[in-house]
Amino acid sequence: MMDGGCACGAVRYRIHVTPMFVHCCHCRDCQRETGSAFAINALVERGQIELLSGEPESVPTPSASGKGQDIRRCPACRVALWSHYAGSGEAIAFVRAGTLDDPTAVRPDVHIYTRSKLPWVAIPEGVPAVEEYYSPKQLWPAESQARFKALRR
């Protein structure tokens, strides 16, 4: 289990599973939305996130794909807790690792959209990095692929 929440404490959550996969996204949208060099997103089944307190609000936001994303934010402090993207819908939450009580509990499995990576960011050796997106069939472990397939049924 991993607990997390927003900056003001109004929204608290608990994740009951290990993430299927973890992205470090270097796209310009993530840079803009976080005010940082990248966003680290842990992909988990939305049904495995238990709200302990508060209720995040949905904020539709543009994305590089043109399909947009639905960012769930604390209504009080506005911190982004997780997103839902058009490609995976409500079934998968892209949880912002920085909102975990222990953000060291996850590490990126892949660096994506590195074409817009800031030049001073170093990607660790041995971690896959792609200029845009990738095929989950090529990088996700079999167990994660099975979990994803189960959501599509």
Image: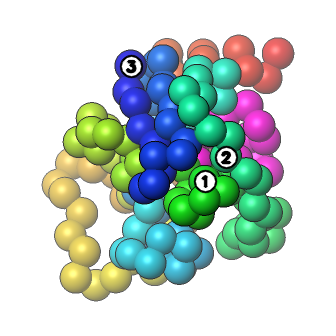
Kind of residue indicated by mark 2: Pro
Kind of residue indicated by mark 3: Met
Q: Which residue is mark 3?
A: 1
| Residue 132 at x, y percent in the picture | 54, 65
Q: Does 91 appear in magenta?
A: yes
How is the rendered protein coloured? rainbow
The circle drawn on residue 74 is 1
Query: What is the secondary structure assignment of the residue under circle 3?
Result: loop
Residue 44 visible to the viewer: no
> Callout 1: few (<14), some (14-19), or many (20+) C-alpha neighbours within 10 Å?
many
| Residue 96 at x, y percent in the picture | 47, 50
Residue drawn at x 55%, y 73% as measured from the top left: 33
| Residue 93 at x, y percent in the picture | 62, 39
Position of 61 with respect to 128 (left or right) is right
Residue drawn at x 42%, y 38% as measured from the top left: 4
**Which portion, as a residue range, is magenta?**
82-93
Kind of residue indicated by mark 1: Cys
Are dots 1 and 2 in contact, CB under 8 Å? yes
Residue drawn at x 75%, y 61% as measured from the top left: 59
| Residue 66 at x, y percent in the picture | 80, 70
> Mark 1 to mark 2: distance in Å?
5 Å
Q: Which residue is mark 2?
A: 56
Residue 144 visible to the viewer: yes
Q: Does 80 appear in magenta?
A: no
The circle drawn on residue 46 is none
